[in-house]
Amino acid sequence: MTLPVNAISSALQQLQSMAAQAAGGSTAATGATAAGASGAATAGGFASALKASLDKISGDQTKAIGESQAFELGASNVSLNDVMVDMQKANVGFQFGLQVRNKLVSAYNDIMQMQV
């Protein structure tokens, strides 16, 4: 029963660290904008955070597929519990990435429909 609690607390810690990084990046970008620089620091920070998230999602999926194949081949060091947990982690990560993509597309469409 402690496994889901540990997984939830781990996910919460990751979200908090990402929020702290985003807050740190936005204050640095605000200071740079106030100094007369462009908002490129914010775009670079967002792009790198997005790429890191996509790489993590891809890595989780690759790990889950590798473990499931190892389990199917009868590897003694891979249990069904580990395979199922990793498959669910990969699925949740993919669904999260999909929702972020949908929100980004929606925001882009809203911005494109604004009249200047």
Image: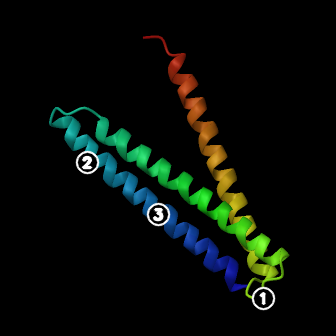
Q: Quadrant of the C terminus?
A: top left
Give the mark, 1 or 3, whose residue is nearer the N terminus: 3
Quarter occupied by residue 47: top left
Q: What residue is pinned by disc 3?
A: 16
Amino acid type shown at disc 2:
Ala
As drawn, the residue found furthest toward the top would be: 116
Secondary structure under the numbered disc 3 in the rendered image: helix
Q: Is residue 72 left or right of residue 44?
A: right
Give the mark, 2 or 3, whose residue is nearer the N terminus: 3
Residue 22, given in percent of the width and then of the height, sits at 39, 52
- Color theme of the render: rainbow
Q: Contact (CB < 8 A) between labels 1 and 3?
A: no
Disc 1 or disc 2, which is closer to the eye?
1
Q: Categorize mark 3 by other alpha carbons within 10 Å: few (<14), some (14-19), many (20+).
A: few
Residue 104, given in percent of the width and then of the height, sits at 56, 36
Q: What residue is pinned by disc 2?
A: 28
Q: What residue is pinned by disc 1?
A: 76
Residue at 28% x, 48% y is 27
Amino acid type shown at disc 3:
Gln
Residue at 34% x, 41% y is 42
Between 81 and 42, the residue placed more toward the observer is 81
Q: Separation of disc 1 and disc 3 at Cα?
A: 36 Å
Secondary structure under the numbered disc 2 in the rendered image: helix
Q: Quadrant of the N terminus?
A: bottom right
Q: Categorize mark 2 by other alpha carbons within 10 Å: few (<14), some (14-19), many (20+).
A: some
Amino acid type shown at disc 1:
Ser
Residue at 75% x, 83% y is 78
Q: Separation of disc 1 and disc 2 at Cα?
A: 50 Å
Q: Is residue 31 left or right of residue 114?
A: left
Give the mark, 1 or 2, whose residue is nearer the N terminus: 2
Quarter occupied by residue 3: bottom right
